[in-house]
Image: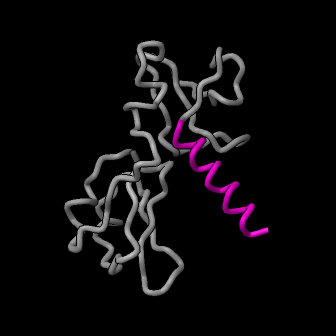
């Protein structure tokens, strides 16, 4: 599951510096707080131990990269890797997957050759659903 930073973040920035995937960034709100891009977060948890007020927690809504809920964790996709959010599919914004020994990445949602039946990253599905709900509330 990806991580989330609680609303009581004091904005120290330690988490941002610790993140090897650059998934943590400064939010627009005041006071200064940090946010985690769930599609870039690969669950390494390096940021958790650096938070002085312990507000970084697992988001129970999101699957663990390569763990339970991730199609790439199954034997069916043994050896496949994913872009973990960087880069993303230019068509749909989904994760890009690379087959074993391959150097070409494909989108499992857009590329009919890659995924039969289609498989998708549960993080991408969750983020899309959350954005659609937020857009519905703002209309």
Horizontal and vertical percent for residue 70?
46, 30
Residue placed farthest to the bottom in the image? 31
Horizontal and vertical percent for residue 1?
39, 45
Residue 48's place in the image compared with 103, above or below, is below
Left or right position of 60 against 71: left
Q: Write down the region rendered in magenta.
A: 122-139
Horizontal and vertical percent for residue 3?
38, 54
Left or right position of 5 against 92: left
Res. 5 image quadrant: bottom left
Residue 8's place in the image compared with 89, above or below, is below
Residue at 29%, 61% (x, y): give it. Answer: 18
Residue 132's place in the image compared with 70, above or below, is below
Question: Where's the C terminus, which quadrant?
Answer: bottom right
- In-front residue for pair 86/12: 12
Horizontal and vertical percent for residue 120?
58, 31
Left or right position of 128 against 52: right
Residue 108's place in the image compared with 91, above or below, is above
* The magenta stretch spans residue 123: yes
Residue at 24%, 68% (x, y): give it. Answer: 54
Residue at 74%, 69% (x, y): give it. Answer: 138
Protein image colouring: one colour
Residue at 63%, 19% (x, y): give it. Answer: 115
Q: Main secondary structure of the magenta part?
A: helix
* The magenta stretch spans residue 136: yes
């Amino acid at each position: 599951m990806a991580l989330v930073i609680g609303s009581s973040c004091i904005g120290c920035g330690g988490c941002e510096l610790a993140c090897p995937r650059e998934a943590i960034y400064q939010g627009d709100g005041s006071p200064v707080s940090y946010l985690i891009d769930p599609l870039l977060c690969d669950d390494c948890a390096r940021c958790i131990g650096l938070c002085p007020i312990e507000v970084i927690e697992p988001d129970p809504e999101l699957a663990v990269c390569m763990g339970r809920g991730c199609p790439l964790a199954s034997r069916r996709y043994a050896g496949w890797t994913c872009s973990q959010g960087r880069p993303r599919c230019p068509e749909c914004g989904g994760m890009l997957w690379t087959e074993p020994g391959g150097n070409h990445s494909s989108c499992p949602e857009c590329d009919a050759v890659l995924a039969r039946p289609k498989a998708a990253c549960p993080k991408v599905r969750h983020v899309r659903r959350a954005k659609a709900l937020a857009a519905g509330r703002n209309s």
